[in-house]
Structures are given as structure tokens and as C-alpha cells.
């Protein structure tokens, strides 16, 4: 979250004449990652696994 805030602050306050392109900070995940295809059964298993571990599900 801090990285998003930092890049937003940098872009909102940049001198567009000196830096015409927006700043992009590196992230530990791909910017446009494709979602994997999951079958209905796999989705149900994954959802049940998340619900077993979630502090908000109880």
C-alpha cells in the first residue's frame, strides 16, 4: 500500500516539464498478471480452504 501511495504522491507533485512520463515504482508482483483458469471444483476447494483459515469467517 505504501508503494501505491508513494507513486501517487510522486506523480501528483512532479514537474511535468522536467518529468513528462509518470513515475512507476517496481512491485514484487507483475503489474498485469493474468488470472489462472480454475475449474468450479477447484474454486470450491480453494474457497473452503480460505474460509477455514480466515479470521473473518467465524
Image (cartoon, rainbow, N blue to C red):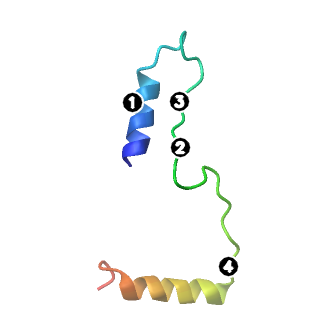
Is mark 4 in CB contact (under 8 Å) with mark 2?
Answer: no
Q: Could you tell me residue 18's position as x and y percent?
A: 53, 11
Is mark 1 in CB contact (under 8 Å) with mark 4?
Answer: no
> In screen coordinates, is 57 left or right of 15?
left
Q: In this view, does 6 lie above or below 39?
A: above
Q: Could you tell me residue 39's position as x and y percent?
A: 69, 83
> In screen coordinates, is 46 left or right of 57?
right
List the residue tagged with mark 2. Answer: 26
List the residue tagged with mark 4. Answer: 38
- Near-viewer residue (6 or 28): 28
Q: Report the disc number at residue 9.
A: 1
Task: Give the residue displayed 29% in from the left and 79% down from the top.
Answer: 55
> How far, Cα to Cα, is label 4 from label 2?
28 Å
Q: How crowded is mark 3: few (under 14 residues within 10 Å), some or many (20 or more)?
A: some
> How far, Cα to Cα, is label 1 from label 4?
37 Å
- The kind of secondary structure element at disc 4 is loop
- Near-viewer residue (43 or 31): 31
Q: In this view, does 57 lie above or below 25?
A: below
Quarter of the image where the C terminus is located: bottom left
> How far, Cα to Cα, is label 3 from label 4?
34 Å
Q: Specify which label sits upstream in the sequence, 1 or 4.
A: 1
Q: Specify which label sits upstream in the sequence, 1 or 3.
A: 1
Task: Give the residue displayed 43% in from the left and 27% down from the top.
Answer: 10
The label nearer to you, 1 versus 3, is 3
List the residue tagged with mark 3. Answer: 23
- The kind of secondary structure element at disc 1 is helix
Amino acid at each position: 500500500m505504501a508503494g501505491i501511495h508513494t507513486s501517487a504522491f510522486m506523480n501528483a507533485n512532479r514537474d511535468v516539464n522536467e518529468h513528462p512520463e509518470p513515475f512507476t515504482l517496481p512491485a514484487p508482483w507483475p503489474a498485469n498478471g493474468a488470472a489462472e483458469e480454475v475449474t468450479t471444483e477447484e474454486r470450491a476447494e480453494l474457497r473452503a480452504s480460505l474460509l477455514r483459515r480466515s479470521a473473518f469467517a467465524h
